[in-house]
Amino acid sequence: MIIRGDEPEQIRLIKKLYKPGNYFMQGNEAVAYGAIFAGCRFYAGYPITPSSEIAETMARELPKLGGYYLQMEDEIGSIAAMVGASWTGLKVMTATAGPGFSLMQENLGYAVMTETPLVLVDVQRSGPSTGQATKGAQGDFFQARWGTHGDHPIIALSPTSGQDAFWEIIRAFNIAERLRTPVVMLFDGVLAHTRELVKIPDVEEVEITYRKLPQNEEEARLPFGDPHGDGVPPMPLFGHGYFTHVTGSTHKENGLRDVYTPEVHDRLVRRLHRKIEQNRHVYEKYEEYFTDDAEILVVSWGVTARPALGAVLKAREEGIKAGLFVPKTVHPFPGERMRALGKKVRAVLVPEMNLGQMILEVQRYVNDDVLLKGVNKIGGVPLTVNEILREIRGVA
Amino acid sequence: MAKEIYSRYPMVKYLRKEALPTALCPGCGGGTVLNAFANAVDQLRIDPKDLVVVSGIGCSAWIASPYFLADTLHTTHGRAIAFATGVKVGLPDKKVVVISGDGDLASIGGNHLIHAARRNIDITVILVNNMIYGMTGGQVAPTTPFGAKTTTTPYRNIEHPLQISETVAAAGASYVARWTTAHVYQLIESIKKALQVKGFSLVEVVSQCPVQFGRRNRMKEPAEMLRWFLKNSVPISKAKKMSPEELEDKFVIGEFVNRERPEFVSELNKLIDEVQEHFGLKGEDDGV
């Protein structure tokens, strides 16, 4: 909608509907409002705990803005409908949880291959399988990275609070549009259902990015080319008479299928990787606390970064030189910064609500002489400040 | 050769020339379906710029994408209708057409098929039913006739075929018709009607696959399969008076449903209008 040029109208509606100020809301609601501010006007989903309030909020709010809420027959249909809608120029989102995320994986790969901007929120819950359906967890770190098949890049963000989620979902849309790629947001059941203060800004303070459209017929004829050298082809939208052919099969720059020529596949898939790699500045993001002089580094993500910060603050009070590193974009992992930090410390602790996932990424970037230890808890209850503090003291 | 084809067949103007020749086997019914669809588009004078054609995986999915010259979306296995749903919501003024096979749309994609019919979204589905998994090598399909031989039912098929048109009609579609590739003119007329109906429309085309189905069931030549279709086709009016046993290995042809029901995308936009009206969000800038 917004991308079709009626932005002033949308700004007027948002201003009228959502007064800037402080609100007390669930993380899920913060995600939904953030998406609306980012220009999302199409939501297709299938209800699943603990993500359902995102769908409910979108169903309530989108029609007010002239946007579309579709409850599809399943998760597979949801992401499929999003891809279809994205090619008509709409900004699209869905939200799901572990099992639904599994079902969406095939079409997530399709979106990577066809370079379709979309935002997929995975509100992680405790698994495997139905597990503890209503409890939070951080077990989908690698499902986001490796859930679909083939060699593919992926971008995944992970916010640490409701307020953070509001801004991170906007960032997710901006990255998806700028790089013409799906973006996953790894949220979790704990933050999703926690009510806390969320400050809603004036809509004009929000920076919005739009996908690149073809500037001429020649660019439109090459929907999978790289005319600007940034790896991101302009996207010829459906309905404009370009006769665009989109396929998940290996295709040439003009979109036509060629699955027989090794060079065509090589060129396409390497460009998909290069697009993500060379645009690191667009999406790389992390936070650091007391890392300047830290001897013990805590590396944590998502919901667990909060008790981790509490533990680091308490450790500092006790005179322990602890620091905290929080990747906000978790895929691709901020490895360069991690490597630099890893050289300065003697111990790295990785608290997570799983039995050890992000720690494997961290391990790739720290040397063997650093003591690397996971602080892991499963069962649906988040780690506490004291649980993490105890581990910091243990290596101090 | 190519020049001759382009000058001899007027429908070639609707095809993506750089994608030709087609990958379809000689004698495949897919060419008939492509031809019928192009003729329907031509007779209705639909500008291909107003068409978006979506397909899934398999031989029949290739009929329209890449060969038809329009915006074409070649999707994952079974999901074409769900992709098309998003396209139609985004482009309500365009004709959104799904062309794919029985394995794609009625087996793995069966859920999307019945729910699109229930929703009555304004999409035209041309479902090519060749009663077999062609591209993967002739395995049994949910539409394979009882007793037929396939590569995965080497002794005989012990499952009963899904009656697609009956199922979709019962699910709530606005228009449903079934023909075979031996009924080309009726097929074109039905595709034309389906394209004009406001609501979910399905045209099922029973089609020959001499390579994967025919040759294992004593019909090696395409013409033998067409003769089989003609001999065993029963018009729907006559079928109503026949018992299920008598209809077991027959192809019931004709129009199953042609009715008006509220359509999904227009209802969705109506709802948006009502909501915006209710919250006073319509019209001029009121100074906020």
Image (cartoon, coloured by chain):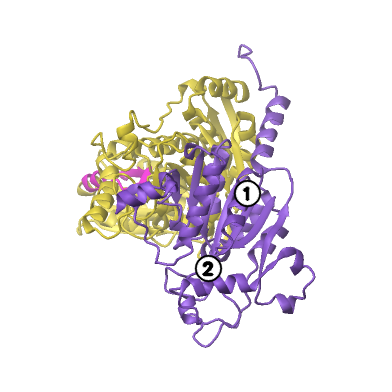
Residue at 64 percent across and 40 percent down: it is B265
For disc 2, the neighbor class at 10 Å (few under 14, some 14 to 19, many from 20) is many
Q: Is residue B208 magenta?
A: no
Q: Amino acid at mark 1?
A: Ala
SS type, badge 2: loop
Residue at 42 percent across and 59 percent down: it is A376
Disc tally is 2
Where is residue A184? Give x, y as percent: 43, 47
> Can the viewer see residue B188?
yes
Q: Is residue A332 magenta?
A: yes
SS type, badge 1: helix
The one of B115 and A188 positioned closer to us in this rendering: B115
Tell me what hue chain B is rendered in.
purple
| Residue holding disc 2 | B130
Residue at 65 percent across and 34 percent down: it is B269
Furthest toward the top, the residue is B287
State the extent of the magenta-drawn residues as a range: A319-340
Where is residue A89? Give x, y as percent: 47, 35
The numbered mark 2 sits on a residue in which chain? B
Residue at 41 percent across and 52 percent down: it is A110
Tell me what hue chain A is rendered in.
yellow
Residue A233 occupies which quadrant of the picture? top left
| Residue holding disc 1 | B194
